[in-house]
Image (cartoon, rainbow, N blue to C red):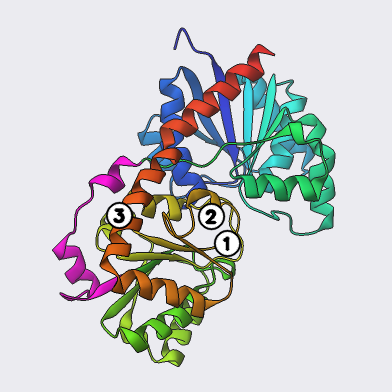
Amino acid sequence: MPNAKGRVVRIVSDLPYGGVERRLLSLLPRLRDLDWIVSVICIREAGQMAPLFERASIPVEVIPFSSRWSPRSLKQLARRLTQVGVDIVHTHMYRCNTSGTVAARLARVKAVISNVHNVNEWDDAKQLLVDRMLARYKDKIIAVSEGVRRNYLERTRIPPTKVITIHNGVDLKPFQEAAFDPELATELGVEEGERVVAIFARLVEQKRHIDFLTMAADVLKVLPKVKFLIAGKGKLRGDIERKAAELGISKRVIFAGHRSDIPRLLALTDVVVMCSDREGFSNSVLEAMAAGVPVVATDVGGNAEALVDSESGFIVPTRQPAVQAKRVLALLTDQALHKSISSKAQERASLFSIERMSEKTDRLYTALLSE
């Protein structure tokens, strides 16, 4: 790339199937099209999505760290950054935000950026202290929502000018173009005339699938012909299945597991529910909005920035499944309300396109190098 603006390395732990990783897969080719040379370094292992990055001509390299502060690993990473001639190091999440920052400064990289993807990302006070101390060695810290930015500034007490917000973006087109697929409905066991309420999230505690099932039981008391789709995998699957059995709703719950066909699933979904009690800026919310599927989301992280309550979706309190059920029932029983929310959600999703995210990232990179 003879007229490249600069060389950028994104540093991550690995590349599993996750929201951060899917967003990178959409974003990095667009940054390359904006004349940046981009690649990824993993400091744990490559991960399941690595071949997809390679297929998109985004090189992926693994420099394994035995520990976050391993002198040998830090030197190896710094040496590699120097060899490649990196201009910008852009790190993701706490582990890489620490190791990547130190290695980048050892390599005298021109600009160092860290991404914060969630509120309260630290496991303990020690991690928070380390993050606060390392902030001076970063040129910018990107928060994925204003909610995350406020939380980060409140906890770290670093200068506000150091932290900026670049909202997550999604590739809107696949979600806008997907159509109802009767074969998929049959595969999942969704019968004609049944409505579908879905949650798209890893099966972990912070996503509160227990609340989703409690909400489902309340909805089924009023509307018995509803199926509840759970898309995602994780360590809590057994617990969630047992909870469904305990509530007597197992036959109405579909465990779809990990899926790569989210646009197709959304095309047969009537309502998406986000029950999390901790979130940054949810891909699932943005994708549902892009597909025109009304969302009922808890008031955490950037959810209230993504959608406007009672206009392009509903914002509800955390851990109150009865309130969630009330909103879901309103959407399933009021056709005019569903149509209005659907239209306004799809319109608002355009504010959070992957193109907007790439343009803002491009401007930040250019500004940092010009300084």
Of 342 and 291, the residue lying toward us: 342
Q: Which residues are magenta?
A: 172-196
Q: Which mark is residue 299?
A: 1
Looking at this view, is 231 or 59 the one in front?
Answer: 231
Residue topped by disc 3 = 261
- Point 34% across, 48% down: residue: 346
Hey, what amino acid is under mark 1? Asp
Does residue 60 appear in this view?
A: yes
Earlier sequence position, callout 3 versus callout 1: 3
Residue displayed at 47% across by 82% down: 214
The answer to whether marks 2 and 3 mark residues whose Cβ atoms lie closer than 8 Å is no
State whether residue 210 appears in this view: no
Q: CA distance from mark 2 to mark 3?
A: 23 Å
Q: Residue at x 43, y 50 (%)?
A: 286
Instruction: Please provide percent x and percent y for residue 148.
Output: 65, 48
In the rendered image, residue 185 lying in the magenta stretch gets the answer yes
Distance from the alpha carbon under mark 3 to that under mark 1: 27 Å
Q: What is the spatial separation of the Cα atoms under label 2 and label 1, in whole angstroms?
A: 6 Å
Provide the residue designation for mark 2.
303
Q: Earlier in the sequence, mark 2 or mark 3?
A: 3
Which type of secondary structure does the marked residue at label 2 adopt?
helix
Q: Is residue 50 above or below residue 231?
A: above
Q: Residues within 10 Å of mark 1 (few under 14, many from 20)?
A: many
Tell me if 125 is positioned left or right of 301 in this view: right
Point 29% across, 86% down: residue: 224
